[in-house]
Amino acid sequence: MRDALPMRLVTWNINSLRLRLPSLEKLAAHLLPDIICLQETKVPDPLFPADAVRAMGYEHLHYKGMKSYNGVAILSRHPVTPLEQLPDWHGKEDCRHVGALVHLPSGPLELHDFYVPAGGDIPDIETNPKFAHKLAFVEEVTEWFTTRKRERSVLVGDFNIAPLEHDVWSHKQLLNVVSHTPPETERLTKWLDVGFVDAMRHFIPADEKLYTWWSYRNQDWKKSNRGRRLDHVWVTPDLVADLSGMTVVREARDWEKPSDHVPVVVDFSFS
């Protein structure tokens, strides 16, 4: 019988990689993930701090970034082969998706890292182009994944949608607030149903509160606890048996110069 092959994956909207490089170093040293997926890196590719990241033990990097906004990155201890010819979602060229084959000892894993548009403040496609863009983005991504072979694949990222009732602090009060409106949650569910399993809710039942984001506007985020689950990890059904653990790193919300998102850890034990 083969020994289990563990693998730890972290996804985190870091909200500026260069600003929070010390926090990334802390995360890498304390949690020892094999792979870290970042969103909102906010750094153009020529200025990506590759040397500093490699010094943390992540020799294999794949990233796409721009100045001040968006940006996604895959940091890996294992070799990666970037996926070529990925769509330019909605023709925006705004650095919201990278994909790669990660060459693990257990075999290759297809990994996608997404930063879905936030959608602005008004949940109306007529008056708010940002909201219209968000819905169109999710629809386009969903359609694309229906054509892909969905085996041994993982999707992670800040999807900017809290789909379930207990993914938000108040379902009733947030039904008309961008990130939890029916047009968004219905579309995200359709994307998930293309052929993925919600790895976080595999461990935490849907009737329990689960958050990954707390607004900067809350002076005492812990006391008010008005959170939302905007960050997600999805796996194809063939990987469900390999899931071995999940942690939301809430304490990161109290780190120096914190992001408003906290890291999500998912552990695998490949047979």
Image: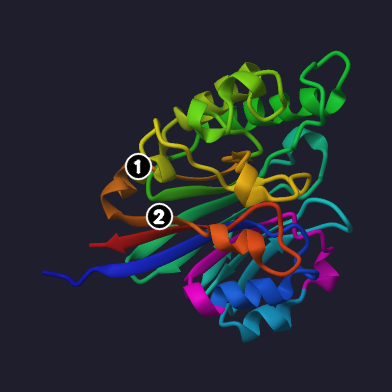
User: What residue is rendered at 41% in x and 33% in y?
Assistant: 195
Dot 2 and dot 1 residues touching (CB under 8 Å): yes
Above or below — where is 228 with respect to 37? above
On the rendered structure, is 200 left or right of 6? right
Pointer 1 residue: 202
The image position of residue 158, as x and y in percent, is: 63, 46
The image position of residue 57, as x and y in percent, is: 56, 82
The image position of residue 104, as x and y in percent, is: 40, 68
Pointer 2 residue: 246
Which residues fall within the magenta stretch? 29-48
* Total tally of numbered discs in the picture: 2
* First in residue order: circle 2 vs circle 1: 1
Viewer-closest of 209 and 6: 209
Residue 30 located within the stretch drawn in magenta: yes
Dot 1: element: helix
Above or below — where is 9 with respect to 133? below
On the rendered structure, is 64 left or right of 138? right
The residues bearing labels 2 and 1 have C-alpha atoms spaced at a distance of: 9 Å
Give the residue type at disc 2.
Answer: Met
